[in-house]
Image: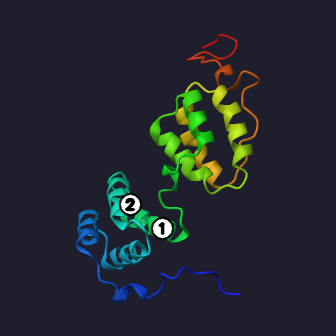
Amino acid sequence: QPAKRHAITGESWRGVTVEPDVQKLADHFGLDERIAAKLQEALNRREYPAEDIEAMWEILDEARNPPGLTMMKVKEMLDGTFRIGEQRNPQVAALAKKFGLDERATYKLSEVLATKPKRDEILKALDTHLAASNNPSALVMLRLADLRRDVPLGEVPYGTKGYRDRPYLGKYDRDGNR
């Protein structure tokens, strides 16, 4: 059985006329004609392409590898998961308020959880971890990779008090010796 492929594969991009807005984005971020055409082809299938182009400017502005990230975003557009983090999940919003998560951590968490069937279990485990954390936003950002790969969060480390339980020892060991 052949692997499932998107409609935008192979040579389909060759006949696409790239609009000026997309070409301007491509020129600014150094995207080749193939990537620009695939982006245009994906945008042609979207309900609000102008808003998606604006979002792409913001996304690519922070990218280390704009061409690679563009192809990931094209795939998300085709899968229907592009900008899904903006559709606020009320449970994530409650968690963000409870632990004072920053906007980026909240958005990324919403984005990842939107694709997960067991999001209630994940949120419950995350609540326990965040309660034990000194810096909840940083913890969310660190755990995103695990959440994407469906790696369970597991138990809170360092005993019952959580992340704060491990004392800072500086240059000394547990016995007070240098």
Q: Residue at x 72, y 26 (%)?
A: 158
The vertical placement of 111 against 90, above or below, is below
Residue shown at the point (52%, 47%) measured from the top left: 108
**Residue 39: quadrant of the picture:** bottom left
Q: Three-letter amino acid code at disc 2?
A: Asn
The tag on residue 139 is none
Give how far apart the Cα atoms at labels 1 and 2 are. 18 Å
The residue beneath circle 2 is: 65
Give x and y (percent) for residue 103: 46, 38
On the image, numbered disc 1 is attached to which residue?
77
Q: Residue at x 57, y 28 (%)?
A: 99
Quarter of image, res 32: bottom left
User: In the picture, which quadrant includes the C terminus?
Assistant: top right
Q: In the image, residue 80 lies at what x, y percent?
A: 53, 66
In the picture provided, is 120 more to the left or to the right than 62?
Answer: right
Q: Residue at x 67, y 37 (%)?
A: 126
